[in-house]
Amino acid sequence: MTIDIVDLTDPEYSDLNAVQVAMVREAQQKKNEILERAEQQKEEYLSMLIAGDMARNTFYELTKARIDAEAQEEIAAVKDDLDYQLAYEALGSEGDENGPYRYPENPNYNLVPSQRFLVVRNYYMQSTDDPDARLAAYAADTLARSYLGEFYTTLYDLLAAYC
């Protein structure tokens, strides 16, 4: 996947943490979907004009410009949201009065649930290569139940799938 939703050099991109990379990839996927949907709308409209023998009509150029403008507005909103999320994550990524954020020693409660899910998943995936031991450790983790909330069961099912 080509990342062009945000202007980062290769060194800047490689300095992003796992949560930030996930945010960038999600935003890039949204942008790609917006562009695909816009292209599909333009193709459908052109097909309709051709079927009605109106392909040389200026309606197509006007409609194409309108579809492109709407897509660019949606992409700008996604980019602004990503910039805000990256800035917010950067503020809270260093840590607090208890030290640097690190699960499970000092979890970051500023993260949204999907980001918490990624942090806990990465922690358990890196903890051991034995899927049964990983699942047993996760099942015994009482912090994960409260920290992940509704995502606890989702992660449990994911880890169980590796067994």
Image (tube, rainbow, N blue to C red):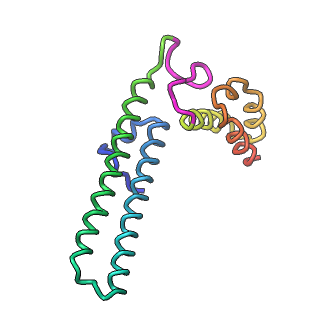
Report x, y in % for residue 86.
39, 35
Q: Nearer the viewer, residue 107 or 152?
A: 152
Q: Within the magenta stretch, is there residue 101?
A: yes
98 vs 80: above or below:
above
Q: Residue at x 37, y 34 (%)?
A: 84
70 vs 116: above or below:
below
75 vs 130: above or below:
below
Q: Is residue 6 left or right of residue 106?
A: left
The quarter of the displayed image where residue 88 is located: top left
Report x, y in % for residue 110.
50, 25
The stretch in magenta equals: 98-113
Q: Residue at x 34, y 38 (%)?
A: 12
Main secondary structure along the magenta-highlighted residues: loop
Q: Residue at x 40, y 70 (%)?
A: 40
Q: Is residue 6 left or right of residue 56?
A: right
Q: Is residue 118 left or right of residue 140?
A: left
Report x, y in % for residue 113.
57, 34
